[in-house]
Image (cartoon, rainbow, N blue to C red):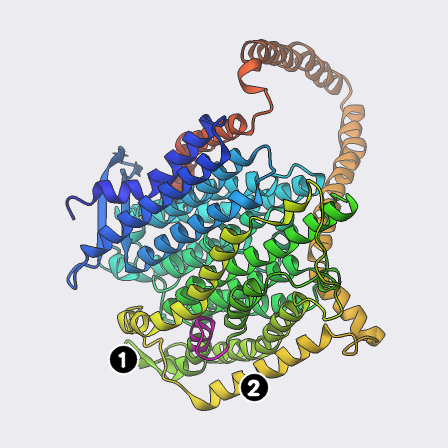
Amino acid sequence: MPGQATELLLIALLPLLAAMGGLLLRRLPPLLHALLGAGSLAGSAVLAVIVNSRFSEESSRAVWSVPWINGWETSTRSMPPIPLALQVDYTQILFILTTCLIGIGVLLYAIRERRDDPFAGIFHALLTFFCGSMLLFLVSDTLLLMYIAWELMGLAGYLLIRHKGTPEANRAARQAFWTTRATDFGLLFAIFIFMFGFGKYGVHMVQLSQISIGWLSRNVPDMLYAVNWMLVASILVLLAVVGKAALLPLSFWLPDAMVAPAPVSALLHSATLVAAGPLLVSRLMFGVTLLPIDSRGQDVNWFISPLIIALFVGGLTMLVGAVCAACQRQPKRLLAWSTVSQLGLCILGSAALASEAARFQLLSHAWFKAALFLAVGIIVARWHERRAAQAGDSAHAEPEFAQLQAEPDAQPLLYWLGLLPAALSLAGIVGLAGYFGKDQILAALLQRSGQEYGNKLFVDALPGMPGYWQAGAWMLLFSIPFTAVYCGRLLAGLRASRSAPPVQPTAGPEAPAATGWNLATTVTVILSLVGSIGLAIFWSGYRQYFEGRSNQLAWGADFDLLTTGLALLLILVGGAAGVLSMSPRGLAAPTPLLTGLATVFREGLYLKQIITGFVAGFGEFLAILAGIADIRLIDWLGMRCGSTGRALAGTAAWLDIHFVDGIRWWSCEIWWIMKRVHGRYWQNGQIQNYMFILLLGAVLLCLVVAFPLNEALGRILGRYN
């Protein structure tokens, strides 16, 4: 559409430019940094509304593309031209508005929460950069640009998690950074396949809008060959999502990241980093590889392998995350495991070919989960402030439910209008937003096998898939009571005990410390009401618009009394058990077996310890193997080869002294000169300078290193074509 180029470009550029301006003008008051970021996000939201107003029934998307990187072609190989392409449709507009509005609320909340932080201005700029990276991811149509946005979100998450600068925060940030980086190569290789895997037919898919089985069938004569490569790419995309969305077995990094301030947790768990994974799955992985197709004598289980992997990864993550959340003693870790469980539910919905229902669940989850984190952040911050005012204790350890229950109930508005609606929506109470997405995913799992696709029933086209969908339905049903358990524990644990002492006025300069939370409370209440009640009212229009658009499958279902009644019964039983577990008389003396199981799930099945031990043990094994090879093989060869061995040893020693040591000496000299010349500008302890260097390196890596890798992968794939 002409005239929309400026709007699409500015949707992502406004927050990014505001963030860079905030980092450069760091001496401005923190309030101005927060208002600058909120204003840029408000501008992006307005631009998104303007773009949406131009949609019509004939064209419900906006596209803009300009030349970016020129391609080339020879008789043996080619590289496609890569445009700078942006595209949004109705679903992306919804997520753009969600990111902008939640980001504005979090920035307003952070004004009070970071009031005593000497680096509050940098913090507000990084929050804006976090939102801008997500917006760039949402509007990107070029795969390379999408990957850059994907990595920028990881960088922003790392910088924000380590903002406190404590050893725990630094460890959590490094763990999150390297865990997500370890799986991001899956997305990079998937992009290479999309761009070069079909090169022998002259087909290069460099844009998201080009990735389609139907588009390939018109350009690639060998359909089976195309589908095989698409399935490999889908599995690689799922691998990247496992790390980014903290799915099993890499779920441990997300609860450990709770050492970050409450605004970071609210953004991280709602509308930015972890939400990008399920959204990418619904946009890129499923639907484009949807079958049935003519298997031509091949094993049909190979063709449905991405769906099977996603179903079990999502279903097990949902179930295990819910049980782990129900066993937590700290509210922030409970909410973190709750996010893990809900992200697994969204992946399960995509595996049931109900991607629009999964997107609605992800959309509503962003709103009420942001409200829950902000509400818990207010309660915990007030608890710390009271401790500092009364006893002079400025420790930053996270309180447990028992400690919070002993405090006076000073904010009933926050509890009844902030915590309660969001927690009930998270539990899936009928009529609230969290119910509709979960109910539609369950309906899809139960009804999909009897539906038709391509004039064939799924039972006939994919004979193994209906059984897997039934397994997913059972996992969802088993997770419902545990979801209600941790929601009940959260509400009961944050409700002050009746025996708590009344609020005592404190004299002196520390008295006003617990004041000033009115704006933060208002923001929390608005997010909670929108995420639980507002989106529930919006549900009918959402379903009417998207019904049957995804792969021509009816993913929505009418109100089923039996299924809804069973889910409601499980919710009530689980919620009662959760409330009872927080009472003094409930589970005051659990059996040793229950205590042991609760400890195992509280520690996340010890996944971090297992994976860390495996990696460390494998490295030690390689070191031992190298030592044995050096002693038993290389030394033996040197001794047995006589004069030839001595000549080789002398040559190696000469190269080590005159060549390797020379390179090391010159490298040290060059580094010393650069440090002396630029030390006063770069090595000054300012985080924005380090961030600029990392950003520059990431961009150079994508623009310089990626192209030789593309060519190498194209040659490898060409040998098997």
Residue 36's place in the image compared with 529, above or below, is: above
Q: Within the magenta stretch, is there residue 438?
A: yes
Q: Residue at x 47, y 55 (%)?
A: 523
Which disc is residue 569 wearing?
2
The foreground one among 154 and 219 is 154
> Please, what secondary structure does the residue beneath circle 1 have?
loop
Q: Is residue 179 left or right of residue 371?
A: right
Using a 10 Å C-alpha cutoff, classify the residue at mark 1 as few (fewer than 14 neighbours), some (14 to 19) or many (20 or more). few
In this view of the protein, can residue 594 be seen by the observer?
yes
In this view of the protein, can residue 611 be seen by the observer?
no
The residue identified by callout 1 is 455
- Give amino acid for label 2: Leu
* Residue 332 rendering spot, x and y as whole percentages: 63, 57
Residue 611's place in the image compared with 650, above or below, is: below
* Residue 494 rendering spot, x and y as whole percentages: 65, 65
Q: Within the magenta stretch, is there residue 474?
A: no
Say which label, 2 or 1, has the lower sequence index: 1
